[in-house]
Image (spheres, rainbow, N blue to C red):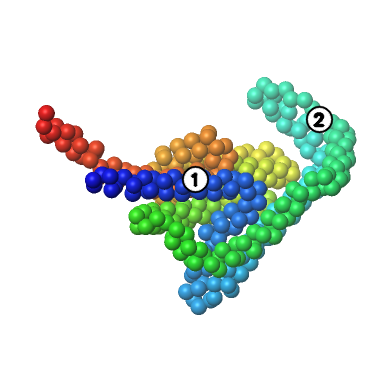
């Protein structure tokens, strides 16, 4: 009789679980269908998560959250504008110098670089013709104009892509503002949807993930500042012009794997080439950036980031390689924060296993005590 009374309840519970699981899958499918328009909301959520502690700190100093959110967004926009003001004039000036000094660069290659490569490495590169280089640049300049013209014409056909990009740029600060203002209210709403049997453990895991991600951000900022100082000082000691802006730019963009490093290295090589002071600055750039890559990958990131989030230095290196192999560029970009989140989950799984009857051997001992 007891079993007959329990079965309907179990059946109802299973049916309810099945229905809610179907609703969850339907929600995930809907998010997948809406993914093209979710980009500004996703980016705004990431920036809001990063900036929410700063708004909270301003609120503790009796600054309303509305004003604090506006100040934080303006500060972020100012930093991005300063980065553009550092980068764009540098590229424009170096590009103009390259056009003006092209004949001298060709002469340097033919008279110094070619004999040096042939003498030390046995390489026989082809000589450059200054007139041919000028003609090539002139043709490319016309090609660039044609490309720009075709791009402008294609806007009539593919204008939705441009509209989407501008919509993202406009919506990003707006969505970020509302998220920052209502941050704690939104968290409370999400917390209210967690099933009560899992509520305490879910909150505990969420707090641990939040703490680990906070430590990751602090560690990443330390790596960026350390590398900005290193590259600026290293390029200055190597005698490279514009050492400070190139070094700071390389350090600040280092959070973008490969792209930030490649951009800084390309600018440094271009500056060194346009100095016309021999091969010395180029060798200096090669040494500075080679040591910088080793310093970042095997010293700064494992120790300043890995130790903060509880990952062993070898685990940090493995995570970067593994996520890069599986997910490519974005895998490397998200390797450490994703590993930190997985680490929190593994800690709880490990604790559950160590507290299980399987680990303690109780299930086996009970089976042995059963009567024949």
Q: Residue at x 47, y 74 (%)?
A: 60
Picture quarter with the C terminus: top left
Q: Nearer the viewer, mark 2 or mark 1?
A: 1
Q: Position of residue 20 (x, y in %)?
A: 46, 49
Relative to residue 205, is residue 292 drawn left or right?
right
Q: Examine the rendering and report whether any part of residue 117 can be seen.
A: yes
Distance of mark 2 from mark 1, alpha carbons? 67 Å
User: Mark 1 and mark 2 in contact (Cβ < 8 Å)?
Assistant: no
Q: Residue at x 78, y 30 (%)?
A: 110
Relative to residue 90, is residue 183 drawn left or right?
left
Q: Which residue is most to the bottom?
A: 62
What label does residue 22 carry, if any? 1
The residue where tag 2 is placed is 128
Which type of secondary structure does the marked residue at label 1 adopt? helix
Q: Residue at x 62, y 43 (%)?
A: 259
Q: Position of residue 324 (x, y in %)?
A: 53, 37
Q: Is residue 31 above or below residue 69?
A: above
């Amino acid at each position: 009789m007891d079993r007959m009374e329990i079965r309907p309840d179990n059946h109802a519970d299973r049916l309810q679980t099945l229905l809610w699981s179907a609703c969850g899958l339907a929600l995930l499918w809907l998010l997948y269908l809406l993914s093209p328009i979710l980009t500004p909301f996703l980016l705004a959520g990431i920036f809001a998560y990063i900036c929410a502690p700063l708004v909270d700190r301003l609120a503790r100093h009796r600054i309303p959250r509305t004003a604090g959110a506006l100040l934080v967004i303006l500060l972020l926009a100012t930093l991005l504008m300063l980065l553009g003001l550092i980068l764009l004039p540098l590229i424009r000036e170096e590009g103009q110098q390259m056009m003006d000094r092209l004949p001298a660069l060709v002469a340097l290659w033919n008279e110094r670089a070619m004999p040096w490569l042939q003498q030390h490495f046995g390489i026989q590169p082809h000589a450059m013709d200054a007139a041919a280089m000028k003609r090539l640049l002139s043709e490319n300049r016309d090609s660039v104009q044609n490309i720009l013209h075709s791009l402008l014409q294609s806007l009539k056909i593919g204008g939705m892509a441009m509209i989407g990009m501008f919509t993202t740029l406009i919506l990003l600060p707006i969505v970020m503002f509302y998220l920052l203002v209502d941050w704690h209210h939104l968290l409370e709403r999400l917390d209210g949807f967690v099933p009560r049997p899992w509520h305490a453990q879910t909150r505990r895991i969420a707090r641990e993930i939040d703490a680990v991600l906070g430590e990751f951000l602090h560690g990443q900022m330390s790596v960026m500042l350390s590398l900005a100082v290193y590259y600026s000082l290293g390029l200055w000691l190597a005698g490279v012009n514009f050492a400070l802006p190139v070094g700071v730019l390389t350090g600040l963009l280092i959070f973008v794997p490969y792209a930030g490093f490649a951009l800084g290295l390309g600018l440094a090589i271009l500056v060194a080439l346009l100095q016309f002071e021999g091969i010395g600055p180029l060798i200096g750039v090669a040494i500075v950036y080679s040591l910088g890559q080793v310093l970042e990958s095997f010293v700064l990131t494992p120790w300043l980031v890995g130790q903060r989030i509880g990952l062993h230095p070898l685990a940090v290196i493995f995570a970067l390689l593994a996520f890069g192999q599986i997910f490519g560029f974005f895998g490397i970009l998200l390797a450490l924060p994703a590993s930190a989140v997985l680490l929190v989950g593994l800690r709880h799984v490990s604790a559950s296993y160590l507290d299980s009857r399987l680990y303690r051997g109780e299930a086996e001992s009970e089976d042995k005590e059963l009567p024949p």
